[in-house]
Image (cartoon, rainbow, N blue to C red):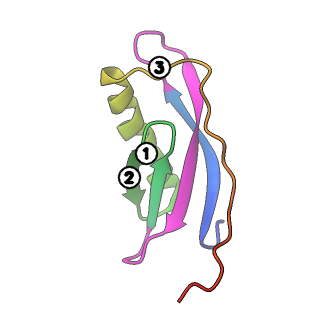
Amino acid sequence: MLANHGVGRLDVPMPGTGDAVELTAVLWVAPEGGFSALNPETGTTSEGETQAEALRNLAEATALYLEEFPLPLGQRPVITTFHIADVA
């Protein structure tokens, strides 16, 4: 289980091909409870009461997005971290 945030795997069917593509899912604990999820390749977001539900909802939202806006092949985001000093 993710403590506060994490990155997971998201398999989404590609429209018109029947093939699945592996995308990135970033999850974090939502302030109101449950989990929020983001797919950085498309910018789609979703939420759920559990990590699994948030991922399922994100996969559905991302698949719908990809029906209208196909993802260019071969482009993957670079996932990294950075530090900000002296945050108030």
CA–CA distance between discs 2 and 1? 5 Å
Image: 88 above or below 51 = below
Give yes or no for contact between labels 3 and 2 (Cβ–Cβ under 8 Å).
Answer: no
Closer to the camera in the image, 40 or 64: 40
Q: Does the magenta stretch include residue 17?
A: yes
CB within 8 Å, label 1 to label 3: no
Residue 20 picture quarter: top right
Tell me the CA gap for discs 1 and 3. 14 Å
Q: Residue beneath label 3, please?
A: 14
Find disc 1 in the rendering and name its residue. Answer: 58
Near mark 2 (Cα within 10 A), the count class, few <14, some 14-19 or many ≥20, is many
Q: Earlier in the sequence, mark 2 or mark 1?
A: 2
Quarter of the picture holding the N terminus: bottom right
Q: Give the range drawn in magenta.
A: 13-34
Residue drawn at (53%, 65%), measured in percent from left and top? 28
Q: Position of residue 45 (x, y in %)?
A: 39, 50
The kind of residue tagged 1 is Leu
Residue at figure coordinates x 68%, y 70% from the top left = 83
| Nearer to us in this view, 78 or 25 | 78
Instruction: Verify CB contact (< 8 Å) between mark 2 and mark 1.
Output: yes
Q: Is residue 6 left or right of residue 49?
A: right
Q: Reply above or below: 60 against 83.
A: above
User: Height in image: 32 above or below 7?
Assistant: below
Dot 1 alpha-carbon crowd within 10 angstroms: few under 14, some 14 to 19, many 20 or more: many
Place of residue 4 in the rendered image (x, y in percent of width and height, measured from the top left): 60, 72
The percent coordinates of residue 75 (x first, y second) are 59, 26
Instruction: Mark 3 or mark 2: name the one nearer the start of the chain.
Output: 3
Q: Mark 2 points at which residue?
A: 46
Amino acid identity at mark 3: Met
Picture quadrant of residue 33: bottom left
